[in-house]
Image (cartoon, rainbow, N blue to C red):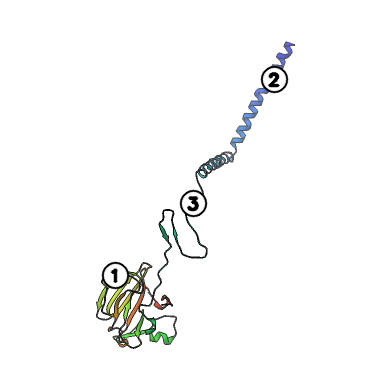
Amino acid sequence: MNDQNKGFQKEEAPKTAQGAQSTTSTWKRLLAKKWVFPATYMAAAAIILTLMWVYQDAGKNTVSEADLGIKVSSDKATDTTKAPDGAVAVNAQTETIQWPVKDRSLVEVSIPFYDTNATKEVKQTAMIQYNDQLTPHTAIDLKAKDDAAFEVLAALSGKVTAVEQNPVVGNLVEITHSNGLISIYQSLSEVKVAKGAEVKKGDIIAKAGRNEFEKEDGVHLHFEIRQVSDNAAINPETLLNAKQ
């Protein structure tokens, strides 16, 4: 019986070694394939990223509008709301431009802005003749219906960036605004502001007067709007608040 057991053990030993060699060969063949390492790398990377995402997400808390003390109104575009500490938060509205006169009904546009898309007749009225040259009008001229002088108002709040006396265009005031626009007022008299002053929309800055450039227009205001970015002139009538 013992001899049989010994014979049995001798026969089993080679099989065990052969099985180990077979397993080793299988792994070698598997690892020899080109796709194994990239696939293993991608799987490991995916596991690491998943663990990082779970860890980071666990530290985040969702904060609602109620937690911040914010009240949202669906029927009002802008509103003032009280913050938790009692401070008032304001959604500021962009200031609209107004006519640079107290009463729009008392003045008329005597010389319009030169618009390339306007009719031929309108273009002709928007040309200024000076020293035998015709120049497109880059503003609108406002004149009182009774030809009297009138007070000139700041069309927008801003900072006075120029106050000059020019022999051609007369007294000039330039105001730079926070919305990227510059308003220019020429043919003035009795200028009431100085360079560097801060003015509010509707403040009186001067009175209408005369100049050489538009001499035929008599007492008037030359009102011009330009962009700060490229100094391009804009037709003021396209920006003016119709309610003013």
Disc 2: CA contacts within 10 A as few (<14), some (14-19) or many (>=20): few
In terms of secondary structure, where does tag 1 sit?
Answer: strand
**Depth-wise, is mark 3 or mark 1 nearer the camera?**
3
- Quadrant position of residue 232: bottom left
Left or right of 74 on screen, residue 196: left
Disc 3: CA contacts within 10 A as few (<14), some (14-19) or many (>=20): few
For the C terminus, the quadrant is bottom left
Q: Residue 239: image x %, image y %?
A: 41, 75
Q: Residue 205: image x %, image y %?
A: 30, 75
> Which is nearer the eye, 26 or 211?
211
* Structural distance between the alpha carbons of marks 3 and 1: 45 Å
Tag on residue 48?
A: none
The single residue placed furthest to the top in the displayed view is: 2
In terms of secondary structure, where does tag 3 sit?
Answer: helix
Q: What residue sits right under mark 1 in the picture?
A: 161
The tag earlier along the polypeptide, 2 or 3, is 2
Compared with residue 19, is residue 109 higher up or lower down, i.e. above or below? Answer: below
Mark 2 and mark 3 residues within 8 Å of each other at the beta carbon: no
**Depth-wise, is mark 2 or mark 1 nearer the camera?**
1
Tag on residue 67?
A: 3
For the residue marked with disc 2, what is the amino acid? Glu
In terms of secondary structure, where does tag 2 sit?
Answer: helix
> Which is nearer the eye, 104 or 47?
104
Q: Residue 177: image x %, image y %?
A: 35, 69
Q: What residue sits right under mark 2 in the picture?
A: 12
- Quadrant position of residue 219: bottom left
Identity of the residue drawn at 38% across and 86% down: 125
